[in-house]
Image (cartoon, helix red, strand yellow):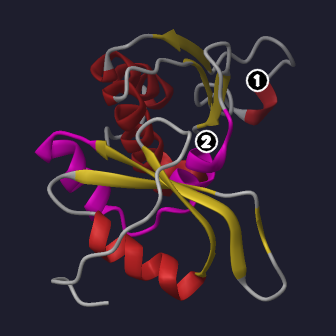
């Protein structure tokens, strides 16, 4: 499929999405390239992937976002956590619990970009960020008294980011 070709996909019952039914991973990649344009972020949902590598019950959602968010999304080298969050069925009562210990550092930007995308769609989730005890010495840690848990229920990405930052009081800011 070249970039000048047109394609028709029947409308879905889902708002802002188009139903594809059964497609191959290669065809899905072709659609990815065609649809992610003009600051749109493409989200895939599907029922299952068969042994034949076909994707069943697939549909996509295109979300128009700001240039800054689109560039942040495109700059993610690894999208593993972002994609996992995209596949999750979340409700307005969902609490997102995020591990912000040092080993999770490479994934922070994915969480932030995902949250910014959800905020741009009008969705707001509660967060609990945790670390391994606010840099306390391992001998000084007492179960239930180590600290390192930060709650945030906000529709402001800067407030969410600042809450994540509190987990790194003694570390260099990222």
Residue 55 left/right relative to 142: left
> Which residue range is magenta in the image?
64-89
Q: Looking at the picture, does residue 20 appear above or below residue 30?
A: above
- The residue at the point 67 percent across, 13 percent down is 93
Could you classify mark 1 by the number of other residues whose Cα lies within 10 Å: few (under 14), some (14-19), or many (20 or more)?
few
Q: Which residue is mark 1?
A: 140
Q: Which residue is mark 2?
A: 101
In the image, residue 22 lies at what x, y percent?
Answer: 66, 73
Could you classify mark 2 by the number of other residues whose Cα lies within 10 Å: few (under 14), some (14-19), or many (20 or more)?
some
Mark 2–mark 1 distance (CA, rounded to whole Å): 17 Å
- The residue at the point 50 percent across, 52 percent down is 107
Residue 25 left/right relative to 109: right
Residue 130 left/right relative to 156: right
Q: Nearer the viewer, mark 2 or mark 1?
A: 2
- The residue at the point 67 percent across, 20 percent down is 94
- Provide the secondary structure element on which disc 2 rests: loop
Q: Looking at the picture, does residue 164 appear above or below residue 3?
A: above
Q: Nearer the viewer, residue 95 or 144?
A: 95
- Quadrant for residue 53, please give it: bottom right
Q: Is residue 67 magenta?
A: yes
Q: Looking at the picture, does residue 33 appear above or below residue 43?
A: below
Q: Nearer the viewer, residue 19 or 127?
A: 19
């Amino acid at each position: 499929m070249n970039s000048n070709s047109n394609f028709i996909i029947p409308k879905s019952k889902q708002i802002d999405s188009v139903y594809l039914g059964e497609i191959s991973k290669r065809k899905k990649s072709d659609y990815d390239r065609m649809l992610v344009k003009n600051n749109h972020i493409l989200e895939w949902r599907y029922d299952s992937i068969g042994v034949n590598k076909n994707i069943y019950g697939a549909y996509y959602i295109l979300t128009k976002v700001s240039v800054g968010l689109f560039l942040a999304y495109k700059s993610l080298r690894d999208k593993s956590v972002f994609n996992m969050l995209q596949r999750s069925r979340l409700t307005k009562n969902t609490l997102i619990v995020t591990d912000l210990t040092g080993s999770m550092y490479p994934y922070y930007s994915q969480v932030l970009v995902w949250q910014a995308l959800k905020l741009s769609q009008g969705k707001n989730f509660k967060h609990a960020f945790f670390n391994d005890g606010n840099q306390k010495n391992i001998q000084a840690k007492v179960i239930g008294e180590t600290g390192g848990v930060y709650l945030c229920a906000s529709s402001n990405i800067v407030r969410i980011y600042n809450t994540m930052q509190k987990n790194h009081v003694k570390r260099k800011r990222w």
